[in-house]
Image: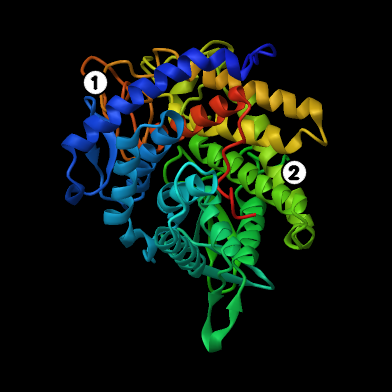
Amino acid sequence: MINIDDTLTSRDLGKGIKELWALSGIKIRRLAERWAPEKGAPVFTIKGQYVNRGWTEWTEGFVYGSGLLQFDATGDKWALEFGRNGTREHMGKHVTHVGVHDHGFNCVSTYGNILRLMAEGRLPQKADEKAYLEMALASSGAVQAARWTDLGKGKGYIHSFNGPHSLFVDTMRSLRSLAVAHLLGRALKGEHDQSISLLDRLAAHAAVTAETAVFFGKKRDTYDEWGRTCHEAIFNVNDGQFRCPSSQQGYSPFTTWTRGQAWITLGYAEELELFQALKAAGRPEADAYGDLVDIMTACAQATADHYIANTPTDGVCYWDTGAPGLAAMPGYQDRPADPYNDFEPVDSSAAAIMAQGLLRLASVLEAEDEAAARRYRQAGLTVARTLLTPTYLSGDEDHEGLLLNAIYHRPNGWDHVPAGRKVPCGESCQWGDYHFRELALMIARDAAGKPPYRFFTGLV
């Protein structure tokens, strides 16, 4: 269980965050100087150098988005132009990519960050640039929403790249693309000019995910426990019936792949922030989706609780709570995580995503449950403090990664095992680096008393 530090504040992490941004700038430049976009998107590092893994190009937005976050945090104009030019020159293909469920990762991290910086007054609002950003984001959200499996009676989900039968938990964080497009006034046009609400599709997907991929200790199966998740939900597309849990990147359907759990916590918490903002603005959507808010709150809290209870004391998780090698590590939850053990790898990228989810969940609960909000906030800060130590923050300027000891696909064996080691360690991934930067930006803004970092800033 995480040993939550109740005394920790965002200001206490200032020194580590300052060091993070100094290293981050060096690493973004180093990769930009070496990497050729025609190679495809860099995904994870091997011996400190980023390589491509052509499964889907879901990480390219993190590359240019990282430059935009670097500018946001430090004012680095080179990083701004790297992110801006990369978005304009290379991200257009992702806007109309009908084969993936990753639009929120690619397009909101790039087009969305530039539009947000304009709304915050950090960039001039050039009418032509603003119009192209809005068109890209509105189109991306509609394309994402069109990747739809209809279950009937108003239910359905955005299916994964595995096909119409497959729902991935990752998509909860990608629902941002539908939210942004809705806020920009876009609806999806269907047969006979039918107008399909993107917010309705967001709500339906979130509800089906809650029903099939998140567990609440209600004895749905033998392994049902409060806050556990599965990576994938499988449906019979002939009649719309849910058939079984599954997993692609986790150990099994009946254990919890921790990065998937982190996507759930962060995805629901971020959408809760949106609906809270809609309510504050007097928007009618806030009342229309009241039941959904209750569902999302339950999912975010359950998964946050499960993570806290099943993670080592320092807040960094192993890649799956049921990974078989953990049986050879008695008491592993009662001490700090060991990324250099001989049995199972940790996943720092899951920890960075979860830390952000914990902080966002705390922000939406502050008004109604102060005690729970404080617990989640302090847990998030505790995880962040661990990630800012030399074990995880890469101080080697020759290593292109920022967040060390991340894992991509353990079952497929894609991650690098260094000489003399038995499990992957010491490497980085684009989503880990990007979400580490987002986490640092959130904490630094809080410490400085600045407005929070929200994907929908300027749209509500």
Say if residue 252 shows up in the picture: yes
Q: Amino acid at mark 1?
A: Pro
Up-down: is 52 above or below 329?
below
Extreme residue in the bottom direction: 192
SS of the residue under disc 2: loop
Q: Which residue is mark 1?
A: 418
Q: Which residue is mark 2?
A: 218
- Residue 33: give x, y in percent of width and height: 18, 35
In the picture provided, is 5 more to the left or to the right than 263?
right
> Residue 460 lies in what quarter of the image?
bottom right
SS of the residue under disc 1: loop
- Return the residue nearer the eye: 107 or 234: 107
- Return the residue nearer the eye: 333 or 200: 200
Label 2 and label 1: CA atoms lie apart by: 42 Å
- Neighbor class of circle 2 (other Cα within 10 Å; few <14, some 14-19, many 20+) is few
- Residue 189: give x, y in percent of width and height: 53, 78
Up-down: is 57 above or below 336?
below
Say if residue 225 shows up in the picture: no
> Residue 241 lies in what quarter of the image?
bottom right
- Residue 118: give x, y in percent of width and height: 49, 48
Q: In percent of the image, x 39 and y 66: which residue is there?
A: 98
* Mark closest to the chain's N terminus, 2 or 1: 2
- Residue 236: give x, y in percent of width and height: 54, 67
In the picture provided, is 57 more to the left or to the right than 128?
left
Q: In percent of the image, x 61 and y 39: which residue is there?
A: 265
Q: Amino acid at mark 2?
A: Lys
